[in-house]
Amino acid sequence: KKQAIKVDLAAASLSLPWIGWSKGAGVPARVSFDLVVNGEENLVRNLQLGGDGFGANGNLTFNKGNLVLAELSRVQLSPGDDFGVTMRSGKAGFDLAINGKRLDARHVIRKLKTEYEGEKAAAGAAKGGAFVATINVDTLAGFNDEVLTSVTARYATRGGAANAVDFRGVTESGQAIVSQMLKDNRNTVSITSGDAGALARFIDLYKNMNGGRRHLRLAAPDAESWSGPVD
């Protein structure tokens, strides 16, 4: 049996804690969808969420009250966003895939610079299993009007510890930014940038730098700290 549902979300708060995005109460938004109950499964079809500068379209599947599959063909969390999301959650872990033309990464960067609740929430959703996130976007927008193009990334954790941190992108000056996790016992991440100034502005670390090649080696002895030299 299918039931058409429309809800005014102006009085509600919405939150995606693993990327640091939220909509506060009082911000206008509406959602409509078809709900199909199929035994222990609740199928949300033709989801259309819309607000000022954000929205999403797609389908969701819940099993015993838990979200097990999200297939969102269009997601916008900031003006200019244009990407899709596929999320799967199960006993083995939590998989998140983002693909599209443009993604504003400032929410994620701000979250990574302040706290790790999102990572913990994702691990909790995976019931202690693995967490894997992959990104493939044409343009990744950061702070200070900096963008990276041809971006591919993969981030994975198991048991709360990172075991893959791979990233590739190109600055507006045509220089590559590459990071990868080395095969050692310290979970060391190597980051090389042919335009250190662009990278520093992109993550809002330092604005008054132009060009320059930098190589960072950051060790992650646990899920909540990174340290290492810069040359």
Image (spheres, helix red, strand yellow):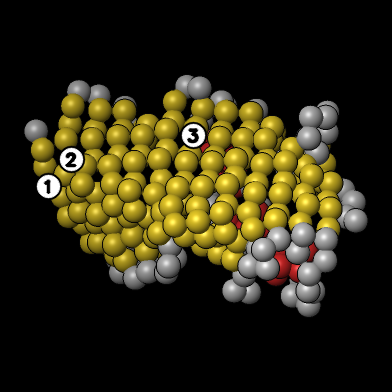
Residue in the image at 20% along x and 23% along y: 39
Q: Could you say which is closer to the camera, residue 88 or residue 179? A: 179
Could you tell whether 134 is left or right of 46 in the image? right
- Mark 2–mark 1 distance (CA, rounded to whole Å): 6 Å
Q: Is residue 206 above or below residue 85?
A: below
State the image coordinates of residue 86 (x, y, percent, origin top left): 40, 40
Return the disc, 3 or 1, that comes first in the chain's sequence.
1
Residue ID for mark 3? 95
Residue with the most extreme bottom position:
208
Label 3 CA crowd tier, 10 Å (few <14, some 14–19, many 20+):
some
In-front residue for pair 12/139: 139
Placement of the N terminus among the 4 image quadrants: top left
> Nearer the N terminus, badge 2 or badge 1?
1
Left or right: residue 62 versus residue 206 is left
For residue 17, say whether it is visible.
no
Q: Residue at x 47, y 22 (%)?
A: 91
Amino acid type of the residue that numbered disc 1 sits on in the rendered structure: Ala
The image quadrant that residue 199 belongs to is bottom right
Across and down, in percent, residue 18 comes to 54, 48
Q: CA distance from mark 3 to mark 1?
A: 29 Å
Element under label 3? Answer: strand
Identify residue for label 2: 35
Q: Of the residues shown, which amino acid type is indicated by label 2?
A: Leu
Whole-number angstrom distance, CA of label 2 to CA of label 3: 24 Å
**x and y percentages locating residue 142 in the rendered image:** 60, 65
Q: Which residue is mark 1?
A: 4
| Residue 88: quarter of image | top left
Q: Earlier in the sequence, mark 2 or mark 3?
A: 2
- The reply to whether dot 2 and dot 1 touch (C-beta < 8 Å) is yes
Counting the numbered discs, the total is 3
Tell me which residue sits at (36%, 34%) in the image.
69
